[in-house]
Amino acid sequence: DYLALTSKSSKDKVPFSEQKVKGISKKINEIPYVSLLKAPEVIFEYDKAVVILHLKNEKINTIDGILGVLPTSELDNKLLINGQLNLHLYNPFGTGKEINFSWQRIKQASPIYKIAYSHPDFLKTSLKLNFHLNSLQEDSTFRNLLWSVGFSQKLVTGKELKLLYTSKNHINLRNESLSLVNLPTGNAKIVSRMVGLNYKVKSTNNFLNPNRGVSYEFIS
């Protein structure tokens, strides 16, 4: 799986390092879908050091929601699907990726949806690809659309540097109270674009539910 494929020591012959063995627990702690049952063991045989990890798969993937159908006169009495759906997948098919999707519609023309996707070792590099998309629409009045794409790089255990490009779009669907010059034909909109650099430090005893440690992030 992803953990085995990305572990250099599992593929290459490298000199034994007690310091690296001690650092295994911290690295495993950064992976939400597995945990160590006990400290790593080292066995020396045939002039080799073999590290044994007792791992447990954590069941953290979630899917929940509620859906309903309603007839609506505005759609020629066709059925309207409304409700809420949440999906969060870690390490699908052993690839190390993360997929997060949520959708909600209470009123007919007011859907809300969020999509997040992360892809480690993008194009066989040490970079992680991150993509986020948020959409909020209020009837036929306006729509807010925010999306970002970027790359993050692990520096050392617990420290990460991230470069992001973000686009924010406010779309006036009625186009009555907003008059802007040089807009294309159609709905008026305001667009802002930003480039950011984030530095994150996380050192906790548990990835999802920590009860001790520190975690902070600098955003620019």
Image (tube, rainbow, N blue to C red):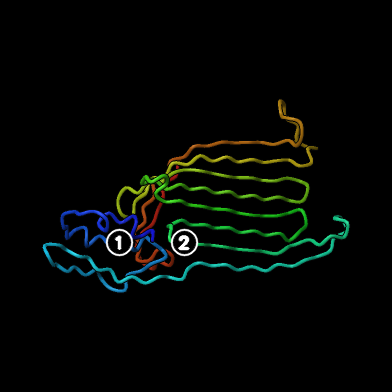
Q: Residue at x 74, y 67 (%)?
A: 68
Q: Earlier in the sequence, mark 1 or mark 2?
A: 1
Rendering coords of residue 63 (x, y %): 57, 67
Q: In the displayed structure, does residue 39 sit left or right of residue 192?
A: left
Q: Quadrant of the C terminus?
A: top left
Whether residue 198 is visible to the viewer of this picture, yes or no, is no
Residue 25 sits in quarter: bottom left
Residue 34 sits in quarter: bottom left
Q: CA distance from mark 1 to mark 2?
A: 24 Å
Q: Secondary structure at mark 1?
A: helix
Q: Is residue 9 above or below residue 172?
A: below
Q: Residue at x 67, y 50 (%)?
A: 136
199 vs 115, nearest the viewer = 115
Q: Are marks 1 and 2 in contact (CB under 8 Å)?
A: no
Near mark 1 (Cα within 10 A), the count class, few <14, some 14-19 or many ≥20, is some
Q: Residue at x 48, y 48 (%)?
A: 130
Rendering coords of residue 190 (x, y %): 66, 36
Q: Residue farthest to the top? A: 182
Q: Mark 1: which amino acid?
A: Lys
Rendering coords of residue 111 (x, y %): 70, 55
Q: Quadrant of the N terminus?
A: bottom left
136 vs 119, nearest the viewer = 119
Residue at image mark 1: 26
Residue at image mark 2: 93
Residue 20 sits in quarter: bottom left
128 vs 142, nearest the viewer = 128
Near mark 2 (Cα within 10 A), the count class, few <14, some 14-19 or many ≥20, is few
Q: Is residue 184 above or below residue 173?
A: above
